[in-house]
């Protein structure tokens, strides 16, 4: 098995390599600041954990004090977590507002 160049791989794949690069570059030009609005997969995992634990019957205040959450987030990230639409939708607006009031006092 020989090692080919990118150009040779491009010929064999029908131009897939160069098309992927062009798509990514085009997307970057369309919105060069999109990286500012992306969420990390870590934040997604934390949000899913909060939703799952609340679904199991734990109060939100207790979940936010959980070592799993506190060791992986800053206070700002926990506050931002309460702004996520999927968290508000799953837990309820009143529950989230109550947790916000407790964290600010």
Image (spheres, rainbow, N blue to C red):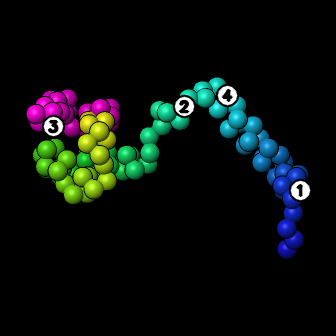
Q: Nearer the viewer, residue 87 or 21?
A: 21
Whether the magenta-drawn stretch holds residue 100 is answered as yes
| Separation (CA) of disc 3 from disc 2 | 30 Å
Secondary structure at badge 4 equals: helix
Residue bounds of the magenta highlight: 83-105
Can see residue 98?
A: no
Tag 1–tag 3 contact (CB < 8 Å): no
- Label 1 belongs to which residue? 8
Residue 29 badge: 4
Circle 2 crowding by C-alpha within 10 Å: few under 14, some 14–19, many from 20: few
Q: Which mark is residue 34?
A: 2
Residue most toward the top? 30
Query: Residue 99 is drawn in which quadrant?
Result: top left
Q: Are marks 3 and 2 in contact (CB under 8 Å)?
A: no
First reached walking from the N terminus: tag 3 or tag 4 = 4
- Which circle's residue, 1 or 3, is located before the other in the chain? 1
User: Circles 2 and 4: CB distance less than 8 Å?
Assistant: no
User: Helix or strand or loop: what does disc 3 sit on?
Assistant: helix
Q: Secondary structure at mark 2?
A: helix
Q: Position of residue 28 (x, y in %)?
A: 64, 32
User: Of 56 and 64, which appears nearest the observer?
Assistant: 64
Foreground tag (3 vs 4): 3
Mark 3, residue position: 103
Mark drawn on residue 70: none
- The quadrant of the rendering that contains the C terminus is top left
Whole-percent x, y for residue 51 in the image: 26, 45
């Amino acid at each position: 098995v020989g090692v080919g160049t990118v150009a040779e791989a491009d010929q064999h794949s029908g131009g897939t390599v160069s098309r992927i690069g062009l798509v990514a570059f085009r997307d970057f030009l369309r919105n060069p600041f999109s990286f500012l609005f992306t969420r990390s997969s870590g934040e997604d995992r934390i949000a899913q954990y909060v939703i799952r634990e609340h679904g199991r019957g734990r109060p939100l205040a207790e979940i936010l004090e959980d070592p799993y959450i506190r060791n992986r987030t800053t206070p700002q990230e926990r506050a931002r977590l309460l702004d996520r639409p999927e968290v508000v939708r799953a837990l309820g607006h009143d529950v989230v507002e109550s947790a916000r009031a407790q964290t600010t006092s």
